[in-house]
Image (tube, grey):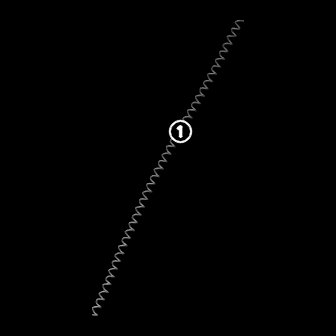
Amino acid sequence: MFMCWSSAHGYMGKREREIERQRERQRERQRERERDRERDRERERETERETERERERERQRERQRERERERDRERERERETERERERERDRERDRERDRERDRERDRERQRETERETERETERETERETERERKTEKKKSKEK
C-alpha cells in the first residue's frame, strides 16, 4: 500500500510538475506577449513623438518661411516707397523746370514789352521831333 501510495504519489508529482511547467511556460509566453505589446506601445509612442517632432519642425519651417515672406514684403514696400520718392523728386524737378521756363517766358515777354515800349517811345519822339521840325519850318516860312 505504501508503494502504491508512493508510486501514485510519485506519478501525481510528475503530473503536477508537468502541469506546473506548462503553467510556467504559459506565464512566460504571457510575459513575452506583454513585453511584445509594451515594445509595440513604446514604438508607437516613439513614432508619435517623432511625428510630433516632425510636425513641430514643419511648423518652425513654415514660421521661418512666413518671416522671410514678411521680410520680402517689407523690402518690397521699402523699394516701392523709394520709387515713389524718386517719382516725387522727378515730378518736383519737372515742376521746377516748368516754373523756370514760365519765369523765362515772363522775362522774355517783359523784355519784349520793354523793347516795344522803347520803340513806341522812339516813334513818339520821332513824331514829336517831326512835328517840332514842321512847326519850326512853318515858323521859319512865316517870318
Instruction: Determine which quarter of the picture holds residue 119.
Output: bottom left
Rendered image quadrant of residue 112: bottom left
Q: From the viewer's perspective, is residue 57 above or below residue 89?
A: above
Disc 1 marks a residue whose amino acid type is Glu
Task: Looking at the picture, tell me which residue is in the foreground, 114 or 61.
Answer: 114
* Residue beneath disc 1: 56
Where does the image place residue 78, in percent across and percent down from the top left?
45, 52
**x, y percent for residue 87:** 43, 58
Count of numbered badges drawn on the protein: 1
Figure quadrant of the C terminus: bottom left
Give the quadrant of the N terminus: top right
- Whether 73 is drawn above or below 26: the answer is below
Of all residues, the one furthest to the front in this rendering is: 143
Quadrant in the rendering for residue 137: bottom left
Residue located farthest toward the right when viewing the structure as drawn: 1
The crowd level at tag 1 (other Cα within 10 Å; few <14, some 14-19, many 20+) is few
Instruction: Give the x, y percent position of residue 100.
Output: 38, 66
Asked whether 131 or 90 is in front, the reply is: 131
Question: For this view, does 68 lie left or right of residue 23?
Answer: left
Q: Secondary structure at mark 1?
A: helix
Above or below for 42 versus 132: above
Along the viewing direction, whichever of 130 and 12 lies nearer the viewer: 130
Give left or right: position of 100 versus 7. left
Please indicate whether residue 115 sits to the left or right of residue 66 in the image: left
Q: Residue at the location (53% across, 39% down)? A: 56
Identity of the residue furthest to the top in this view? 2
Spot occupied by residue 107 in the image (x, y as percentages of width and height): 36, 70
Horizontal relation, residue 87 to residue 37: left or right = left
Of 113 and 12, nearer the camera is 113
